Amino acid sequence: MKVVKNLAMRAAPWAIPLLTIGIFVFDLFAPVGVAVSILYIVPLLLTFLSSRERDPFYFCIVATSLMWIDLFLKSPGIPIPYGMFNQVLGTVVLWGVALGLIRYKRTQHGLVEAEADKTKAMRELMSERVERAHAEGLMTAAQEARAYTDTALLGAISSRRDMEVKLLAAKVSLEGIVQSAMDAIITVDEEQQVLLFNHAAEQMFRCSAVDAVGKPLDKFIPSRFRTTHHHHVAEFGKSGTTTRMMGSLGQVTGLRADGEEFPVEASISQAGVEGKKYFTVILRDITQRKRLEAAQARFESLVASSEDAIVGESLDGLVLSWNRAAEDMTGYSAQEVIGRPLSDFLPKEDAEKERNFLALVARGESIDQYETVRIRKDGRPLYVSLTISPIRNDQGHVIGASRIVRDITEKKKLQEELHRAEHLAELGTLASGMAHEIGTPMNVILGRAEYLMDRVTDEPVKKGLKTIVAQVERITKVMNQLLAFARRKPPERSPLLLKDIVENSLELFQERLARSRVTAQLALDDSCPKVQADPDQMSQVMINLLMNAVHAMPNGGTIRIGLAPEKDMVKLTVADTGHGIPQEDAKKIFEPFFTTKESGKGTGLGLTVIKGIIEEHQGSIAVESEPGKGTTFTILLPQSL
């Protein structure tokens, strides 16, 4: 017996850890319903063979830790409350037995010490008592273990009830959240049968939960997308990803119960419960957003394609938007302007007026078709019509200003042309009447003066009569110019070489040019095409320009005449090296009765007539001049077809 006991005591230190590890591994893979943890009692009982009194206590600490580690390492699909109950029960039993063993070992050690002091005669009696004490100790340990077990069981039952109450509260709370959510929430199983269909989903798909739950999700997907949808869900299930956020799936198309398709954004998540997968999708109807985006795109397209400049402005005058027409109109790019005060790009004298405009807009008022002048980036004036309106937010508060700026430069030019045409018409009527009323008396005066000149011999009288004749001829010339101005005949156009007109006109002026010490330099392109023009009127234009050039060089100089093709036009230039024309006078040089010549030496109608002739030929005339350096007239006429 002693040999067996000795072998058992030697094997116990190795058997205890091996059995413990084996039970731990077995418990880890055993079903949750099997109380494997109770097997830890076997290595616990082996600690009885240890000579150390507290070994059962240390073993219980290790075994308890392993039992609970086993519980938390099991798959997440097990029913946690039931597993916890088994572990609590096993822990209580284990500790009850351990306490009994500890108490027993203490008693045994006491009896061994007492045996050494007693005689052999008392050994049998002491042995009986030891056995009795041992039995009583086991009974006590069992009773204590039962008491501990009952207490643990009651605690587990109470904890389970508390957990059930909390679980019910969480379920009610989750149900409330799901049903009150603004987005549609739908849960389906692996076969994509609908399990959950919240109130927002009912409204979105116009289908009740009763009609949706238990039905395939395909009911709410257009037929052309169903195969792709099944593939995507299957791939998502295999991916191991638990969630894909809203918008990461791109735009998805839903199908309402009445057959209407609509765009949605979706997020999806998956969860595994007892080996089954469940998919929950959150859907957001973006129909309104898409409509707003489309409306915004149309508005931005209109703004971008508008021929009027459209400018967005804050109430403190900062530029917020600047469309393409604004760039073309002013020469300033959006990058140069946005974020800067608009006043930086306006004439300084208009700063106070602009502040008043913004104050009116801030009060909700508008400025309609206010005409003013702005300056382009290149310094040229820009005539515009402004309409400024308030921009309001959803609450109706004014948060900015919108400017529509229309370029009316051409309109202003047309108005000036119309005004000038009306003025010329009035002058023509006046000239026609004057020529009729003055012409007859002047003819009588001229005839009488010439008659008397042939009959008088007194030189002073004859000289006076010559003065009368000269002045009458001058008046007649002015009246003829007035009549030519007022009753200019329509041009009789034909293919014409301007080179011939230039050469013939210069031939007429040869003597005058020599007498005035003026030389002519020609740069006439022999290959220059013909123009469609009236020869007489072109001669009149050339003679007037040559005459003005000679008058501009009283001390002599040079006339340069150029003729060359330019695109579909023929360009004629006449330049002199005379005294030139001041800039302010050059702007008015073609106006009727405006002249830079001395009083009595010009009528102010020559250039007006020239301009009228050129424009009747669908051409243009321009002047460039600088005081002291001369003047250049440039004429463009259409080529003959």
Image (cartoon, rainbow, N blue to C red):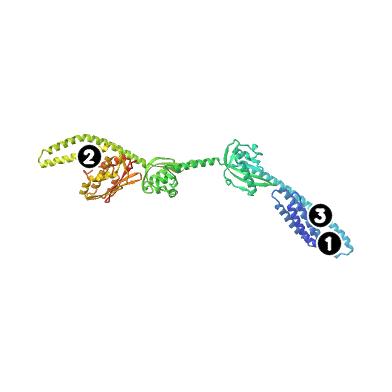
Mark 1 lies on residue: 5
Q: Amino acid at mark 2?
A: Val
Secondary structure under the numbered disc 3 in the rendered image: helix
Query: How many angstroms separate mark 1 from mark 2 (CA)?
Result: 157 Å
Residue contact at pointers 1 and 3, CB within 8 angstroms = no
Mark 3 lies on residue: 140
158 relative to 211, above or below? below
Q: Nearer the viewer, residue 592 or 272?
A: 592
Q: Residue at position x 20%, y 35% from top?
A: 439
- Horizontal side of 292 relative to 10 (left or right) equals left
Mark 2 lies on residue: 478
Answer with mark 1 or mark 3, whichever residue precedes in sequence. Answer: 1
- Horizontal side of 586 relative to 440 (left or right) equals right
Q: Would you call the spot at circle 3 few (<14 residues within 10 Å), some (14-19), or many (20 or more)? A: some
Nearer mark to the viewer, of 1 and 2: 2
Where residue 540 appears, as percent x and y from the top left, is 26, 41
Find residue 470 and report its image quarter: top left
Q: Residue at position x 34%, y 44% from top?
A: 569
Answer with mark 1 or mark 2, whichever residue precedes in sequence. Answer: 1
Which residue occupies the extreme left position in the image? Answer: 457
Find residue 405 and report its image quarter: top left
Where residue 231 appears, as percent x and y from the top left, is 63, 44
Where residue 594 appears, as percent x and y from the top left, is 26, 43
Answer with mark 3 or mark 2, whichever residue precedes in sequence. Answer: 3
Residue contact at pointers 1 and 2, CB within 8 angstroms = no
Q: Would you call the spot at circle 2 few (<14 residues within 10 Å), some (14-19), or many (20 or more)? A: some
